[in-house]
Image (tube, grey):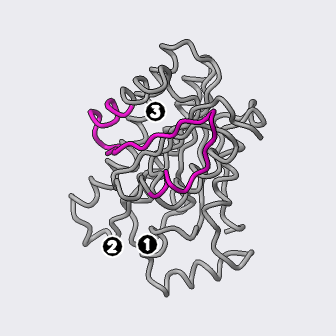
Amino acid sequence: MSFVGRLAFVTGGGSGIGKAACQLLAKEGASVVVADKVVKNVNETINSIPSSPTQMHLGIDLHVEKSESVGNALLQMLEKYSKPPTIIVNCAGITRDNFLLKLSEEDFEEVIDVNLKGTFLVMKTFGKSIVDHGITNASIINIGSIVGKYGNIGQTNYTASKAGVELLTRTASQELGKMGIRVNTILPGMISTPIVETVPEKVQEKFMSMIPLKRFGRPEEVAEVIAFLASDKSSYITGASITVTGGF
């Protein structure tokens, strides 16, 4: 597939699935905006993605849970490209794991703010700009999680946030479809990312025993699904939730 001439915006682009998505979209010809709250990681991703005379990449310091930061990100893009992106990938996410009875209100709110509210703010801000510019072919891909369907011990905040992302996506797809904006969710399982590396070894072993393919996924494997949903090959898919779990 080719994304030559397309502009992509990826939150959480500094590491994990977001970084892999940036690399693949750029490889296929897109101009990529790498957005992350860790500037060092943004620069590393920018330096790792291919470019050509037809591509202009950009790195942005972004805190998705802050509406001002999201608005500034859009302004920076409009100043550089004179148009909003037609590919939006919401990968930014955090964990603050603890058992329900020990989980602090602050840790609950922070995870909801970044994972759920952040996805909402990006969709609203950039979706409005897409409509205002009269663009009628755009794709928003949100990263949920398989644990948002089934729950996971020690992650009441994270599972709630990811369940919210999935239903936020389905509703947004119904509202934005008539404007030519497709909205889909990817539900990864255990993928070898910095977040998964924080999971205790015993818990990782438990998950491994439940995966028919007997391995964790790679960020690049999720990126391939992101690219499919961003492309015209998925032109009749919206409101969908696609699991990438190795059969978990």
User: Is 159 within the magenta?
Assistant: no
Q: Rounded to the nearest whole Å, what is the CA distance between mark 3 and mark 1?
A: 29 Å
Indicate the quadrant containing the C terminus: top left, top right, bottom left or bottom right: bottom right
Query: At x 67% / y 50%, what residue is drawn?
Result: 242
The picture quadrant where one finds residue 54 is: top right
Query: Which residue is more in the foreground, 202 or 75?
Result: 75
Query: At x 39% / y 72%, what residue is drawn?
Result: 154
Please tell me the numbered disc located at residue 99: 2
Classify 104 as above or below 203. Answer: above
Question: Mark 3 or mark 2, which is nearer the start of the sequence?
Answer: 2
The residue under label 2 is which amino acid type? Phe
Query: Which residue is more in the foreground, 23 or 18?
Result: 23
The percent position of residue 91, horizontal first and vertical second, equals 49, 50
Query: At x 21% / y 59%, what residue is drawn?
Result: 105
The span picked out in magenta is 44-73
Query: At x 31% / y 47%, what residue is drawn?
Result: 113
- Which residue is label 3 attached to? 123
Mark 3 or 1, which is nearer the eye? 3
- Which residue is label 1 attached to? 153
Residue farthest toward the front in the current orientation of the protein: 53
